[in-house]
Image (cartoon, helix red, strand yellow):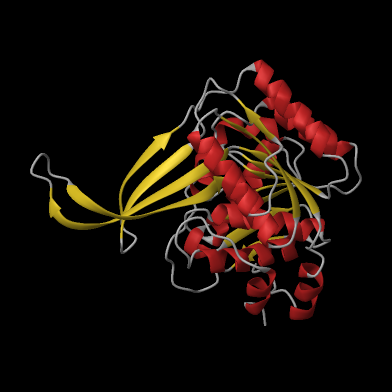
Amino acid sequence: MILPPIDARRARDLVARFPGLPVLVVGDVMLDRFIVGRVTRISPEAPVPVVQFRAEHVRLGGAANVAHNIAALGGRVSLVGVVGADLAASRLRQQLEAAGTSAGGLVEDATRPTTEKVRIVTERNQQVARVDYEEDGDVDESVEQQVVQRIDETGAGVKALLVSDYLKGTITRQVVAALLARMASAADVPLIVDPKVPHLACYAGATLVTPNLHEAETATHRRIRSDDDAREAAREFRARVRCDGVLITRGEQGMWLSHALVEGAVPAIAREVADVTGAGDTVVAALTLALAAGATPAEAAVLANHAAGIVVGKFGPATLTREQLLATIT
């Protein structure tokens, strides 16, 4: 079954509700740094290219990119995450401020570095190497308590909750429990989770979980090559996690939604792909805002699919505007 496209008038009505919608994002914040250069020769020291520096670009990544996407679509976002006491944390705060997002919900942990991914790329956007600065163990108990406290401080009155789990230590069982408690205390506030497989047992009770193709295959021990495969895997994933719904993102094959109310395929939006980095962040941002605006799960999935179709045409973690989103829907 293929989910029907969203009516343009309905899409305009939903997207018009995005501005000012309060959303709480909790997760692993990151800094994405791109060192761009020109390759003209191979090093005489080792069989590797020599990259002649041309430029450096810094962008928000992980949960910070999710928050940036929500802000770019008009949402009023609060962000809770963990950073180190380092230069990357300062740069991340500066990028958040430039994006119109408060860094007040960030918890500083001097015992670990701010997660930073440094990509060395050519002027034609070909990646040569990547260097990761990170500590992927769970944060210690005192930091975890501060994260929970930030959730309590910033979660009142929000219309949606979002977990961006990159397995870098911020998302723990206690942190998810605090979000589930917040969801239970408010009427019609969805909890959307961008998951990691080792934490699946933590997400029980979530409204919608959004594994990518590899995560869905790993969790269900199934190869997903067709819509039938996706349907069975999504049903099994939903039963294992004990959540209300699952949206599997399948790259060029689009998405598959499995929910108690509806299930079906969402075909990919055909366009040239420049870079898929951060596309999942855009999907959960648009999905969350749509649900907060009153969309059905099927409508939210279709809108998120249109959003993903735009950002994959851009280089690196990217955002889009409401106008750009609506321009793809006729």
Residue 219 seen in render: no
20 or 58: nearer the eye?
58
At which x and y percent is residue 15?
A: 76, 68
Q: Quadrant of the C terminus?
A: bottom right
Residue 109: quadrant of the picture: top right
**How many dots with numbers?**
0
Residue at screen point 69% across, 56% down: 71
Residue located farthest toward the left when viewing the structure as drawn: 44
Please give left or right for residue 265 compared with residue 295 in the image: left
Please give left or right for residue 124 compared with residue 34 in the image: left
Please give left or right for residue 119 compared with residue 68 in the image: left
Residue 123 seen in render: yes
Residue at screen point 52% across, 53% down: 278
97 or 38: nearer the eye?
97
Residue at screen point 48% across, 27% down: 135
At which x and y percent is residue 212?
A: 54, 50
Residue 258: quadrant of the picture: bottom right
Residue at screen point 55% across, 36% down: 89
At which x and y percent is residue 110?
A: 55, 22
